[in-house]
Image (cartoon, rainbow, N blue to C red):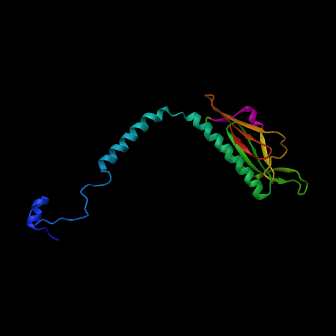
Amino acid sequence: MIPSSENSSCLGLEAGSVVELGTRSHKRGYSLIEVAAAISIMAILVGIALPMWNTSALSVFLARRTVLVTLRLARANAITKSLHYQVSFPDAGHIALSGMRKDPAGSGAWVLDPAKVQTTALPAPAQVSAASLSSRVEFNSHGLVASAAAMTQISLSNSSGTTRSLQVWPSGQINEM
């Protein structure tokens, strides 16, 4: 309906103009300039904060997660494959996951299978503590720690003194400390 000249004067419209209903005059969203400004402010803040980031503490956290994942993988493999798996530390900067086999077959004695050894480097500068280097955790086919009567503690540290530990219980549970 086109407004008449009598009604258009009280609506503030000129004669002959068409009024569209349902349109909005304001826009939604952000302009390219607003997005670029927000990104540049975030980049400046990251640039200021990045040099202050403590990477050595992060390396101990990542090393503990690596050991935790390796222990849980060994336990899961032992249960699902009905074999024994062992986790050990060949040196302060590495962790080894080893599959085991019965030798001789049917004897009940488990020995390391050299074809099933996977060694992983821990993130530097994190290292396994000297007391934990002798730790060997062997999981049997039920997910229990074989020949362990007490909890095994594995400690990781770095040169700045940050230390994190894991506990492996005879039941196979692994706790972060």
Residue 163 pos. (x, y %): 65, 32
Look at 20% across and 65% down and name the residue there: 20
Residue sticking out furthest to the bottom: 1
Count of numbered tags: 0
Q: Would you say residue 122 is visible in this rendering?
A: no
Look at 8% across and 66% down and name the residue there: 5
Q: Is residue 24 above or below residue 147?
A: below
Q: Is residue 98 above or below residue 7?
A: above
Compared across the picture, whether 2 is left or right of 70 comes to: left
Q: Would you say residue 35 is visible in this rendering?
A: yes
User: Which quadrant of the structure image shows residue 44?
Assistant: top left
Residue sticking out furthest to the top: 160
Look at 84% across and 41% down and name the residue there: 149
Quarter holding the C terminus is: top right
Compared across the picture, whether 172 is left or right of 5 comes to: right
Does the magenta run of residues contain 133?
A: yes
Residue 77 pos. (x, y %): 74, 54
Q: Nearer the viewer, residue 14 or 155?
A: 14
Look at 83% across and 42% down and name the residue there: 148
Q: Is residue 6 above or below residue 127?
A: below
Quarter holding the N terminus is: bottom left
Compared across the picture, whether 124 is left or right of 79 comes to: left
User: Which quadrant of the structure image shows residue 159?
Assistant: top right
Range of the magenta residues? 126-134
